[in-house]
Image (cartoon, grey):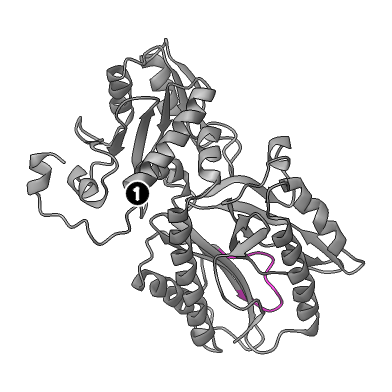
Amino acid sequence: MTQAAAMIPVQGGYVPRFSLGERDRRWKRVRELMAADNIDCILVPPNTGHWDTFQASGRYLTTLGGNNAQVATIFPLSGEVTAISSPDIAPAIWHARQDWVEDIRSAGSGGGWGYTDHIIARIKELSLERGRIGIVGLEGNTRYPEGVFSHGMYEKLRAALPGAQFVNGNFVLERARFVKSAEEITIMEQAIALTEGALEVLRREAKPGAPENVVYMRLLSSMVERGAELPSMILWSAAWPQSPSNYYMPTQRPLQYGDMISIEMEARVAGYNGQVTQAAFIGDPPREYQEMFDLQQRAVARCYELLHPGSIMGDFVEAMKDFENEDYTVRLIMHCRGLGDDSPICIGEFRDEMMRTWPIEVGATFIVKPVIFARNEFRRLYWGDTVVATETGARRLGSRKPEIMRL
């Protein structure tokens, strides 16, 4: 930290931090993958989309981020790592909160909020004007295959660095982030504990007459009170008959006896997501939903059995066919979780052959939530938990009882 930064009164001891050993492990792995792909430098742009998960690769390399803070990262094959922060966050704040990255620059130092001139300057400092630059956010992004990288930034880079070769750097980071360390899994267990605590708030607060938005607010506030950071994804629906999908925002409608509540929720600690999926009824669930839940739990158990080395993602889809019958179909939703929507991902089907044949490794963490659909009319039910793959199958990171909650 510079002397000037050290004199600024900022507090940095009250946020989760990863060790320097964890930094060295990550940087070594990423650089091995870069070398294998002949990449001289990784560029991660500032992008806080999809509940901040588009910042996942930058945060993996630097730990900088949270609450939609915009940070670009320049990560060379050798040499100092550079972060470029939005101008409304002083570099001294970042220095106080972590000890991984020393070279932290402000995007506002040249006026405005532009990042590209700073990125170009750093690439030139590294003498990589003719280098092979891997860009995170080009096509093939896990959730958005068309890509999420700024066209304006890309064109400006090409004009300023005509001798450079710009290539897709997505899967260097996707492969590096796939297997979690003990430190990462500990943080994810903390996040799951916060999410499960919020479900107990749901059990207490969701009752006839309570407005949906008030219950939603109390779920969110309970997680933040106990140490979660923002943004936090809460996908919610409350209705009877059942809503055709989750809402992205709650309404102000008072809950009613007989409502079905479906929720996907995650607390976030140090950027890491702890996601759960839960179905609940105000009152007793219809008998058919208990039948669907029993079938769904058998499908979950089968996924857990398969979560070990030797399995590939396609095995899980094939296994779900065993749980279909004349009344119900099964749609597998299962994807790697951590700092974001890590690869691989299956939402009913695979985007490409790489996703289908992705091998399971010990230490990979997934949200597993197969969905049961009634064949004759729209009814669906799912329950899900975040788990880690082991040599013998899944280990849950949470501890709540699998059930349809009765509120």
**At 51% across and 43% down in the image, what residue appears?**
177
**At 77% across and 66% down in the image, what residue appears?**
372
Q: Residue furthest right?
A: 326
Label 1: how many Cα within 10 Å (few below 14, some 14–19, many 20+): many
Q: Is 74 situated left or right of 331 in this image? A: left
The C terminus: image quadrant = bottom right
Q: Which residue is mark 1?
A: 65
- Residue 315: tell me if it is visible: yes
Placement of 161 over or under 118, stated as above or below: above
Foreground: 374 or 3? 3
Q: Is 66 situated left or right of 246 in this image? A: left
Placement of 236 over or under 27, stated as above or below: below
Q: Position of residue 79 (x, y in %)?
A: 31, 25
Going by the numbered disc 1, the residue's amino acid type is Gly
Foreground: 48 or 151? 48
Q: Quadrant of residue 86?
A: top left
**At 35% across and 68% down in the image, what residue appears?**
227
| Magenta portion: prevailing SS class | loop
Q: Position of residue 334 (x, y in %)?
A: 66, 55
Q: Secondary structure at mark 1?
A: loop
- Residue 379: tell me if it is visible: no
Q: Position of residue 35 (x, y in %)?
A: 49, 23
Foreground: 327 or 177? 177
Q: Does 226 lie within the magenta span? A: no
Find the magenta span and give its range. Answer: 238-247
